Image: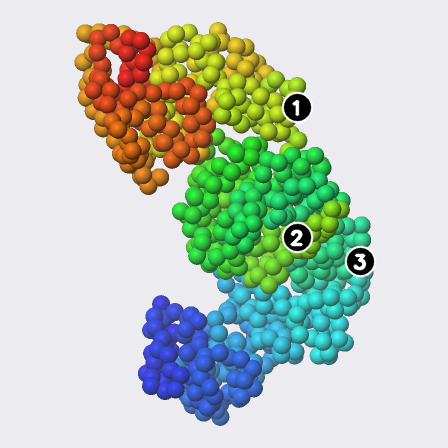
Amino acid sequence: MDLKVLQAQRWYNDTYAGTSGYVEIAEDGITGTGTCKAFVRALQYELGLDVDGSFGKGTLSSCPTIGSGSDPSLIKIIQCGFYCKGYECGGIDGIYGASAQSAAKTFKEDAGFEDEDGNMQPVFIQALLNTDAFKLVNQGISYVREAQQYLNRNYVRKTGIIGLIACNGIPDRNMSKAVIIALQYEEAGKTMNGVDGIYGNNTLNKAPELALGSTKEEYVRIAQMCMMLMYNNRYVSGVYDSFFENTVKSFQEFYCLTQDPGVVPGVIGRITWASLLSSKGDTSRTATACDCSERILSDAKAQKLKETYDIVGRYLTGTVGGSKPKNLTILEIKILARNGLRIFPIYQDGGASPDYFCNEQGIKDAEKAIEAAKNLHIPDNTIIYFAVDYDYTQDQVISKVIPHFQGIKSVFDASSVANYRIGIYGARNTCTLVSEEGLAVSSFVSDMSTGYSGNLGYPLPDNWAFDQILEYTVQASDGTKFAVDKDVASGRDTGFFGGDLCGGEDETDYTKHAMTLREDGYYECPFCGKSVISPFVQDEQILSENDALKIKALTYMYGASMGDDTYRNILYAICLEMNRIRTKESYNGKYGYSDENGDCLLIPPEGLYNDTDFMVSAYEPEEITSQNITFYNGIFSTFVDSLYGLAVDAKYKLTLGEIIAKLLQGTDPPVISLYEILVELAETAGQTEFVIILNLLKLGIDINEAESKSEAEIGDIGVRVNLEYPNPNGREAVVIFNKEGKFKSVAF
């Protein structure tokens, strides 16, 4: 709390309560927008103007210069403004004495004007009564502040297009606009002809070429200030020396302007000027990437893209306009690969709303993105770009977007079924802030949105891979028209190539295929059509009797654990234990679904059931005798609760009891099989491949029989499974089979 600001706030509330346009402000000692607007309202009230708190052109033109002979009420408003800006002025007494004059001179110097008198002219009053800082702030840079002062002194006050810009050392959109005003003013021969602060072709066409030894001192200064905003230049000298020439070369290389044959290294020509003045730059320049919201499902469309581009960004999920699918498909991957196009994946199911972003939504987005990418067989290490298609302020990025990406990262870090990397699509500053937090490794920059506050006055992020600069429509050879976004590619991310997802129909190492399980029990590569039988179908033929029983026990455990909030994290560990059994040396070369060494491949669970903190170990099956039956029945005394009471409502809003009730409808007598229960549960949990396995193996038992015979009997076969949790206090599960090897029950 600032006591001087508190004094000013109390004075305003005490003085203007009940007057026209009065809005009470908080007396908190903090200079905020509400406080600044209050003093503008006070000024408007004293001048007899409409009271709205906005210091626009009408207020500016009606505002007098305020000094020693001015109305005391006006002087008090100025004194309050000084206190809110941090200048001592001798009190709020309506006397414009030496302290007030000293405050005025200091404020003007901070705004870039030396040797000024102690009065406050309208342009300075406008700057005083807003939230802009004119002193160097904590995150400000001194040389940026000097440039801001230079712009105020030489262009902003002269032209009157905008108010004085902040001199806080932080580049922003107003500084960017001031630079454009400066360029237009010089282009107009220091007149106001065509000066409006709006960047366009007219401004660009008049910008002169600058090179080593250029004598156009003011233009060089403007270019140096542009380079301060868009890159890392640290001085404004007006001299185009070898040092600045090297800075220009470095800028051109970093922005990939040198990809265009029209760019001369070290020379500021049209294309370089465009990238200094606008986030999108010259949209006619060379670019080798694009992105599309429309599916590329014909060779004609793919060939049209290949005429210009090498890589295309495509969406993993979603629709255009709520109805037209925009999600990437396997067929599309094949078509793009056939035409030599690489792909970089984008995720956006929301992201264009200010209220969309939060940690919980980030977790959901990450889960959906990984699932979609895995279903498309997108290879590990691929970067997925999560879209932030909204113009957030820096504070909003910190409070909303960063927690969102923390949620995304938490899922990516925990995933063992996929090893994808996180990218971000958004405005320059948004990408930079998220990347600096270690939450994204690559940026896809929405530079087409030139009006975004997160683009104006900010350089490209250090890790930028794609720079989106133009949306336009193309026409394929078959007459099809479709929209394309033109993206400059830095080469930092080359995406993936669909042709690499498949080793060809003669390849017998199935790690080099993108395999999908068919309903007949065969895995098939959607790219070349090669197929191979599932290990689940081969287990009985290949494994020893004990190992086959262990696989069967683990399969029942998988089904019982599926979807349960307590046990679903062991699904991946169960799959690892199955694979450990199948890859014993004695089984090498016997499974069809294998790698180049003849070892059976791991079949992971679908979805994000991928916790690596758990380990599962199946012991050798043992006959249940009078010596161990007490142990088994001690666990199985709670069998009905532990199997038929498993809850899936935490994730799927449905209990197993409801699943059973649903299946019993219309059956007389009411008998269902465990097979039916597991199928229903698997479908609810999104485990489509497990449903296929259940259909192939026909695992089943009547529920009534399970309830009556779930406990172990002497002569049954028991398989104990050790569950090793992250803590040392592990647990055991047991699976019981009868003498004929028929499943009886499972409990944890």
Give the image location of residue 439, x and y in percent.
Answer: 50, 44
Residue that carries the numbered disc 2 in the rendered image? 483
Please state which of residues 152 and 205 is positioned toward the viewer in this rendering: 205
- Label 3 or label 2, whichever comes before in sequence order: 3
How many neighbours does mark 1 have within 10 angstroms: few (below 14), some (14-19), or many (20 or more)?
some
Residue type, numbered disc 3:
Leu
Q: Which of 471 and 126 is in front in this view?
A: 471
Residue annotated with mark 3: 212
> Where's the N terminus, which quadrant?
bottom left
Q: Horizontally, is 243 left or right of 518 in the view?
A: right
First reached walking from the N terminus: tag 1 or tag 2: 2
Helix, strand or loop status at disc 2: strand
- Residue 556, relative to residue 166: is it above or below? above
Query: Secondary structure beneath disc 1?
Result: loop
Residue at mark 1: 504
Q: Is residue 393 visible?
A: yes
The residue positioned 60% from the left and 54% from the top of the image is: 446
Q: Residue 194's mark?
A: none
How would you rate the neighbour count of disc 2 (Cα within 10 Å): few for under 14, some for 14-19, many for 20 or more? some
358 sits to left or right of 311? left
